[in-house]
Amino acid sequence: TLSLAWKRLYASEVYVEEGALHKLREAMKSGKSVVLLPTHQSHLDYMLLSYAMRAEAMPMPHIAAGDNLNLPGLGGVLRRGGAFFIPRVIKGRDDEQLVKAVLKAYVDVLVRNGAAIEFFAEGGRSRDGRIGRMRLGLLSLVAQAGNKKNQIEQARIEAEEEGDRSRLEKAPRDVVFVPVAIAYDSTLERATFAEEARGKKKEKESLFGFVKACFEVLMQRRGRVYVTFGKFATLEEFEEHAWKKAPPSTASSDFEECQLQHRHVVGSIGEYLARQLRAKLVITRTDIIAAVLMEKWSSGVQGGWVTLEELVAKSSWLAKQVADRGAVVSVDWDDMELCVKNALELLHEVVQIENEGE
């Protein structure tokens, strides 16, 4: 089903960085818990890595999803694909402490069993394609669960409670953080995001909206998708770096010292993730063309209109400038006019074209 959906949407044009899945497979075989941290531009992100991993006969990850997607019919499908649902807002709930305890326990189990986990550190979907600020809640839980001292202490507690000394023999597992940048020529939500930018209120997810989106999936193509991976890094590496680089401690107790150290580690992971994602995100042909069109529209020159010839020239110039600065740019360098025309087709919902061909 996943394969058919992607072939319909993106005509099999899902490009995964060469060698990346092999490296991911080796990390999963190492016994460490692998944490996949993708960018988040579309609800389709939930399926994309699962699709790529399943195609390579790899175990699919456990995916943290907002409970707004736990809709009748859809929730069951996502669960079978590895999703587990968490409230979008936990702070201030009547059962806040219970939800936090259950989520912490679940993450502990996943990490200690070496399971692959996937979640979006940005939280919600990016409306403009830019990498958002990292939200550190789940990263903090993973770092707690992966800490060797915490794992040893948890094993000791369970051994005493269950009278099973064999739990003490289980070696602590390290955690591998895997930044994953996902770039779309065109997301499923493109027109919706454009309407929100013009002031329309965000619609709450619903079964009707899901069915409507499925119908739209069957009606049109969305171009290409690019999946690139940042440098893998382990929790142990972040902890060692934190010990070396931490400022002089002002903690008044060992507990407070551990808390400060933990916050420093989690903050370092978030900063590293943001840098890696920005460096690896592919700049697509629609990104380039949209940037030129936006610049023209905001200038007000000629009413924001631009000729095809001018658009091709400016897009070629911008793509070269971006590429020269080290970014990965995906345009058809050999035929920029065709590239621009293809991009305009993909942007037809948000771009007005008159006298087509001129």
Image (cartoon, rainbow, N blue to C red):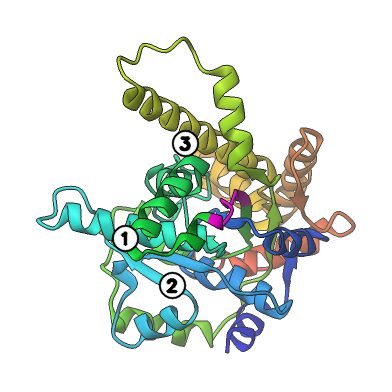
Nearer-N-terminus badge (2/1): 2
Which of 57/31 is in front?
Answer: 31
Q: Which residue is located at x 19 percent, y 58 percent?
A: 98
Span shown in magenta: 169-179
Which residue type carries mark 1? Glu
Circle 2 SS class? strand
User: How far apart, in angstroms, are the residues tagged by discs 2 and 3?
Assistant: 24 Å
The residue identified by callout 1 is 161
Quadrant showing the N terminus: bottom right
Nearer-N-terminus badge (1/3): 1
User: How far apart, in angstroms, are the residues tagged by discs 2 and 1?
Assistant: 30 Å
Which of 252/94 is in front?
Answer: 252
In the image, residue 171 above or below residue 130: below
Q: Are there few (<14), some (14-19), or many (20+) residues within 10 Å of tag 3?
A: many
Per the image, is 178 magenta? yes
Side of 45 where 199 appears, left or right: left
The residue identified by callout 2 is 83
Q: Which mark is residue 107?
A: none
Q: Are there few (<14), some (14-19), or many (20+) residues within 10 Å of tag 2?
A: many
The answer to which image quadrant residue 209 occupies is bottom left
Q: Are there few (<14), some (14-19), or many (20+) residues within 10 Å of tag 1?
A: few
Per the image, is 50 magenta? no
The residue identified by callout 3 is 266
Residue 95 on image: x %, y %: 14, 58
Residue 335 on image: x %, y %: 86, 60
Residue 146 on image: x %, y %: 50, 48
